[in-house]
Amino acid sequence: MIRRDETKSFSPEQYRGRLRFVLGTLVLIATGLVARAVDLQVLDEGFLEGQGDARYTRIAKLTANRGGIYDRNGEPLAASMPVDTVWANPPEVMKAADQIPSLAEALNRDKRWLTQLITSNLDREFVYLVRHMRPSDAAKVKELKIPGVYLQREYQRFYPAGEVTGHLLGFTKKYDDIGQEGLELAYDRWLGAEAGAKRVIQDRLGRTVEDVESIRAAHPGGDLITSIDLRIQYLAYRELKAAVQEYGAKAGTVIVLDIETGEVLAMVNQPAYNPNDRDQVAASRYRNRAATDIFEPGSSIKPFIAAAGVASGRYHGNTIIDTSPGFVQVGIKRIPDKHNLGPITLATVLAKSSNVGMTKMAMSLPPKSMYDTLTAFGFGEVTGSGFPGESAGLLNEYSHWRKIGQATISYGYGLSVTPLQLVRAYATLGAYGVKRPVTLRKVEEPVPGEQVIDPRTAKELLEMMESVVSMEGTGKRASLIGYRVAGKTGTAWTADAGAYSSDRYKSSFGGVVPASHPRLAALVVIDEPTGDRKNGGDVAAPVFANVMAGALRLMGVPPDGLDRVPATTLVQANP
């Protein structure tokens, strides 16, 4: 059967209805598009810009240099060298995972280690790959143009003099310019730099294509000009190291002060460490013994006890003290001399380092006068150097002294000092009784001080101390050709578990040069020398002589003893 299609016709009214429906639909769509455009362009503009910026802008760090440290003549002691740190965005790096082996080779790292580092941190956007690469090596990484791998400029601290200035300067954190020890710590706020920040636009490879705005300006650290004379520092380091090795000593210290200003011209210790090699940075090696360690000074304290006697008016250099029969009894303790020296002058008591003579003089003085003299010289207080961890030593108030305590203090036991305290006391004598604070910064103008003892007393003590370096004195090996020397030897037993060792000593020599008008004060301490020669006159005095001879020439100090033949020359001529 044939089926016939029927043609369906529409009325005009139906046609107009459908046309209105289509037009309405188009209008609604257009309205929605306009509304969405308004929403995107007006209402959500800030959000969308932020999303766009998050993909193409970054906050870039503006690095700044930590201040340099220099010696008094402008020689660099510490500087910050530019280095590059390589970091990565792990998710981005994985988009080019096939380049990880090339990256590992450029970083000089194991491929498996690098792959594990990246794949185990896919939830992070920042991972360090290598810290502090040399810029030339980091440039090879940059040439690879691996997505997600970036360079960041940083600075690494470098110490040109190495272990020669290690104890003095200290060091900063390994990867951050923050002072940890020494002058780096003491002046960290002055030396420290303040990093800046800026907003930049980067391409997909992390390269900066445009600076957007400055957020915070970078501020470099200030430079520090120290009081140190690197030439004298090297000289002191060389002589101390040679002596410690020669005598098989446990440790040693040398300090040189400018008497007129209180400036530290040299400060060295043994054993030393190199702050450029962080594997050596251990607490037992990096502490500055010169400022932090305390010890009983032994006979090197005697000039300051003698100062109390001279200040009392009862004693002078030619005052006779009877040391017979070679010992003195104080309570239950017998204090002996090596030999019975008989009746001798106070000058000879110092020259021969008689414990009996010093004890007899000390016991004739009021304890308060001894205490006041010692505190006037700065014992029992810090020196004002500002060095981190500096000790004040130990000096008990005189009301706590017993008779035996007063006696032992007179020859250097029962009180403890730091090498820095002791050398300042010698400098105070050299300044004719003017005590100045110790400083590790260069001084441009005269430094006022405090007159702590009568100048005539100081001059008389210096004359007596010259006899120590005479042919008859215990410190004859500290004498110099062309210069008069005033000083004092010291040899003290080392305390060991509540008692004193019978074979371990601290040997020292402190003094000033030239004696007629002192310019330099120095102290040498040798800890536990071995062998037959252990006293300060044999071990420490020669180091003093060698350091002072060089320092006086370097500073152009004119001779004051050309008419005198040094005791060491006489000894060599007549063995």
Image (cartoon, rainbow, N blue to C red):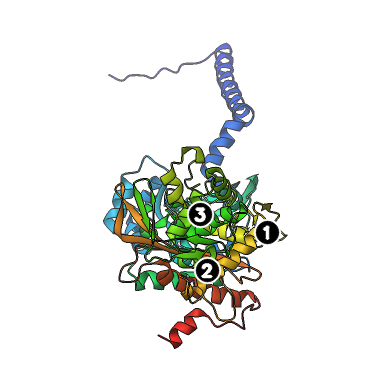
Q: Is residue 253 depicted above or below 331 in this figure? A: below
Residue type, label 2? Gln
Instruction: Return the disc, 3 or 2, that comes first in the chain's sequence.
Output: 2
Q: Which residue is mark 1?
A: 455
10 Å neighbourhood of mark 3: few (<14), some, or many (≥20)? many
Closer mark to the observer between disc 3 and disc 1: 3
* For discs 2 and 1, the disc positioned in front in the rendered view: 1
Residue 574 or 131: which is nearer the viewer? Answer: 574
Secondary structure beneath dot 1 equals: helix
C-alpha span from label 2 to label 1 = 31 Å
Q: Tell which circle, 3 or 1, labels the residue nearer the N-terminal end.
A: 3
**Relative to the observer, which residue lies in front, 547 or 2?**
547
Residue 382: image x %, image y %?
Answer: 54, 48
Left or right placement of residue 380 versus residue 516 in this view: left
Tell me the residue that label 2 is attached to.
233
Rendered residue at 65%/48% (across/down)? 217
Numbered tag placed on residue 399 in the rendering:
none
Residue 503 horizontal side relative to residue 241, left or right? left
Disc 3 residue type (three-letter): Met
Q: Mark 3 or mark 2: which is in front?
A: 3
On the image, numbered disc 3 is attached to which residue? 361
Quadrant where the N terminus is found in the figure: top left
Q: Is residue 256 above or below residue 7?
A: below
Q: Residue furthest bottom?
A: 573
- How many residues crowd mark 2 within 10 Å: few (<14), some (14–19), many (20+)? many
Please give left or right for residue 303 compared with residue 575 in the image.
Answer: right
How far apart marks 3 and 1 lie (CA) works out to 21 Å
Q: Could you say whether the residue bearing mark 3 is in a helix, strand or loop? A: helix
Choose the circle earlier in sequence order: 2 or 1.
2
